[in-house]
């Protein structure tokens, strides 16, 4: 099998699994227990916290463990909104900024806040899926309290200018201080799809909140983290056991936390080499497809993307049918983000990039990973053109994209 869906999830690195194993069995303690079994587990949790802090270039007190990035994103957005209301602000007076290419774990909390009366700006993107920094600058108002911007879009792999936004946010914070505007401005980034490839140094990025997930970085599923900069106020979304400074009640998932720490240590150590390896495969796959499949539209801007993403639209070839046929041939791809792929709705990311609606249905996302080889790419380049040709032969010829009609 050739697995080309690493944005949906990665396999668990064997070294990570080995480190996790004892915490499923002999070291099974509850990290909140104060006896030695518990302390053994708690020590492992704290070691993992240090590993994650090291990856983010911060201190371990600023790391909150969660069940995954969906929870981290929800905690960041609802946590800030609730805190501000607790501090006496009316939600209807508050302004939030996000983008039109977020994962649903960010998009939907903002839609909910909007329904409740909050002012929410969804920034547009350029045709390469990247937000223009001028749009961010123009959108910030005196009552903007939270900017949440995905670091890398999961579908096309576009990388947002997080560092530049961080600078804008810092300048705005200074301005507010001089003007005695006490309203906080908090900067959150969902870095789930970026962690493998780009720096997540929170000082460089100047973020206040940052979400990570275990299962996109060759770590386990069901674990995530939220970086919370010291002084950033937010309210926990689960109440009960008071773990994680009341920000995330619930028994620690010790094996998964241990795995996430180890996975990020490996990412940090091997990032440069891994990026080089993947970029080579990515370029080979992209140029091969462009050479072999006429009228293929690349939606991944290689200059502004991860080295793993290869996203094409093949007008006239229905994405779901292509996916199924490739699966029969032993090649796993996706038509969008895994969470949205069961719905027939057009991808909001592609629509935001200006891809015509009918073309979005011919979109295929391939995401490379460390287990892929040049042979895998050669095999895809042999099979994919035949599959596209087969489905194009069956499709009606009235689709147009720009000047081209199919
Ligand atoms: C950008 C982004 N954010 C959030 C998530 C959700 O992460 P999790 O599966 O850990 O809840 C995903 C998963 O696809 C993602 O790609």
Image (tube, rainbow, N blue to C red):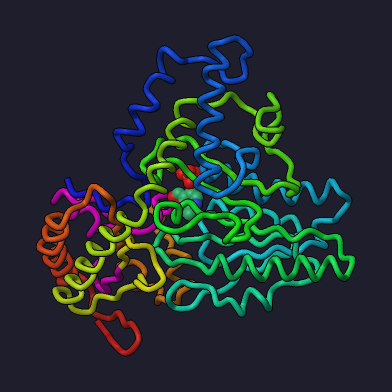
Where is residue 231? Give x, y as percent.
75, 48
Residue 377 quadrant: bottom left
Residue at 19% in and 67% down? 284
Residue 21 visible in the current orientation: yes
Q: Quadrant of the N terminus?
A: top left
Residue 400 quadrant: bottom left
Q: Quadrant of the C terminus?
A: bottom left
From this view, report whether residue 189 is shown above or below residue 291.
above
Where is residue 391? Give x, y as percent.
18, 66
From this view, report whether residue 117 is shown above or below residue 244.
below
Q: Which residues are magenta?
A: 312-340
Residue that protrudes farthest toward the bottom in the picture:
403
Residue that protrudes farthest toward the top in the picture:
35
Residue 367 quadrant: bottom left
Residue at 53% in and 11% down? 37
Q: Viewer-proximal residue, 101 or 176?
A: 176
Residue 114 visible in the current orientation: no
Where is residue 186? Give x, y as percent.
70, 58
Q: Is residue 295 left or right of residue 148?
A: left
Q: Viewer-proximal residue, 248 or 27?
A: 27
Q: Is residue 284 left or right of residue 74?
A: left
Instruction: Give yes or no for residue 315 being in the magenta stretch.
Output: yes
Where is residue 264? Give x, y as percent.
44, 43
From this view, report whether residue 256 is shown above or below residue 326.
above
Count of numbered marks: 0
């Amino acid at each position: 099998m050739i697995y080309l869906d690493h944005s949906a999830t990665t396999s668990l690195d064997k070294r990570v699994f080995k480190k996790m194993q004892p915490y499923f069995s002999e070291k099974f303690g509850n990290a909140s227990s104060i006896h030695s079994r518990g302390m053994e587990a708690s020590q492992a949790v704290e070691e993992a916290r240090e590993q994650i802090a090291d990856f983010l270039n911060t201190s371990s007190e600023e790391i909150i463990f969660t069940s995954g990035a969906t929870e981290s994103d929800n905690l960041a957005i609802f946590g800030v909104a609730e805190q501000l209301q607790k501090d006496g602000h009316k939600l209807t007076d508050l302004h939030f900024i996000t983008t039109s290419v977020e994962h649903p774990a960010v998009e939907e909390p903002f839609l909910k806040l909007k329904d409740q009366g909050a002012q929410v700006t969804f920034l547009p993107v350029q045709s390469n899926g990247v937000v223009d920094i001028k749009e961010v600058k123009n959108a910030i108002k005196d009552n903007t309290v939270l900017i949440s911007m995905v670091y890398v879009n999961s579908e096309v792999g576009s990388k947002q200018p997080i560092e530049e936004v961080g600078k804008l946010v810092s300048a705005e914070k200074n301005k507010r201080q001089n003007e005695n505007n006490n309203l906080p401005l908090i900067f959150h980034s969902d870095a789930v799809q970026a962690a493998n490839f780009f720096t997540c140094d929170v000082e460089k990025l100047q973020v206040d909140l940052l979400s990570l997930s275990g299962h996109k970085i060759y770590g386990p599923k069901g674990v995530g983290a939220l970086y919370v900069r010291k002084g950033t106020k937010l309210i926990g979304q689960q109440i009960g056991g008071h773990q994680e400074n009341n920000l995330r009640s619930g028994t620690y998932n010790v094996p998964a936390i241990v795995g996430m720490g180890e996975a990020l240590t490996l990412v940090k150590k091997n990032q440069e080499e891994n990026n080089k390896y993947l970029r080579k495969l990515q370029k080979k796959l992209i140029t091969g497809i462009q050479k072999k499949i006429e009228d293929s539209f690349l939606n991944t801007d290689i200059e502004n993307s991860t080295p793993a993403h290869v996203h094409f639209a093949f007008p006239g070839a229905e994405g779901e049918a292509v996916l199924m046929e490739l699966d029969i041939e032993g090649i796993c791809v996706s038509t969008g983000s895994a969470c949205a792929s069961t719905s027939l709705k057009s991808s909001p990311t592609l629509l935001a990039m200006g891809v015509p609606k009918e073309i979005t249905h011919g979109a295929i996302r391939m995401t490379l990973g460390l287990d892929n080889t040049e042979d895998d790419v050669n095999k895809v380049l042999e099979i994919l053109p035949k599959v596209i040709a087969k489905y194009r032969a069956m499709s009606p010829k009235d689709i147009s994209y720009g000047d081209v009609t199919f």
